[in-house]
Amino acid sequence: DWSTFQYPGALPETTDFVGGAEGTVFVRQPLVRYSAPLGKGTTLHVAVENPESATATAGSPTLIENGTDHLPDFAARLAYTAGFGELSLAALGRQVRVEAPVRAQTTGFGISAAGKVFLNKEKTGDIRLMATYGRNISRYVGINFAPDAVFLPATGKLEDVTVLAVTGAVRIPLAPGLRANVMGSYQSVDYSSNLPSATIASFNKSAWSGAANVFYSPVKNVDLGIEYRHGQRALASGATGKVDRFEFAAKYGF
């Protein structure tokens, strides 16, 4: 779990990340990490992580998983925990590389700030926010909503893809064993001006979604919930689509 560069705790009891993943930072892969306490409540995490480039070729949004990176991904996160909640600032540096049809490579970077603030002394209510910006880091944002980079056959080069993503959530205690959650997320993608517009018309351009749910715990370790979610997606061509969904969940923790 790439825990050096992720949301400060799971989103409040959202039943899944389909239609709500566009603003989140999440990936699972092998890593070597070192954590160093810097002071009261402050910890620095640094890591080298298994690399993999998910690119597309101009003209087709199909992602190609490349395993030819020569350098690991480098990540760092400065985390602060106090009675009011948690704050963090993370950074990522990486190489994006392809070997076919020709060898090409570029670099990527990202920065992310996140926080969780409790709304009451019991810590049963909180606000969570996260904002992420980067170039050629899409594998880590929104579960590859966009490619890391786009290969342009005419030049034999990888062209940059820039992403901006935000997400937020509020957990509200209503009564003993009863709580509500409201959340939203958004991602916008910018493609290099070197890419002709016709070659990226079918690529994802932006997406946003909002959801609200209510969870009830009648007994310890049992959660019952219902959620409504609305999401919208836009392509670079301007075409749009939307989804509306109700979900029900039952969970027993042990």
Image (cartoon, rainbow, N blue to C red):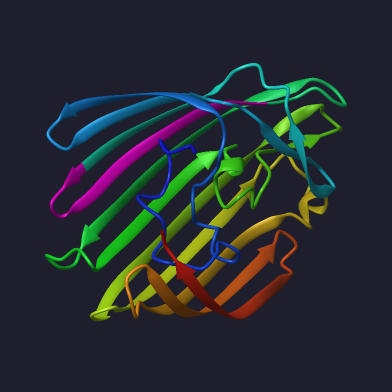
> What residue is drawn where x is 85% and y is 22%?
102
State the residue in front, 236 or 42. Answer: 42
> What residue is drawn where x is 60% and y is 17%?
71
Determine the image quadrant of residue 242.
bottom right
- Residue 139 place in picture, x, y as percent: 61, 42
228 to 222, vertically: above or below: below
142 to 109, vertically: above or below: below
- Residue 169 place in picture, x, y as percent: 37, 66
Magenta span of residues: 81-96
How many marks can you see?
0
241 to 142, vertically: above or below: below
Tell me if 142 is positioned left or right of 64 in this view.
Answer: left
State the residue in front, 131 or 193. Answer: 131
159 to 69, vertically: above or below: below
- Residue 202 place in picture, x, y as percent: 78, 57
Quarter of the image for the C terminus: give it.
bottom left
State the residue in front, 253 or 85. Answer: 253
> What residue is drawn where x is 80% and y is 48%?
62
Determine the image quadrant of residue 5.
top left
Give the main secondary structure of the magenta stretch.
strand
- Residue 156 place in picture, x, y as percent: 82, 26
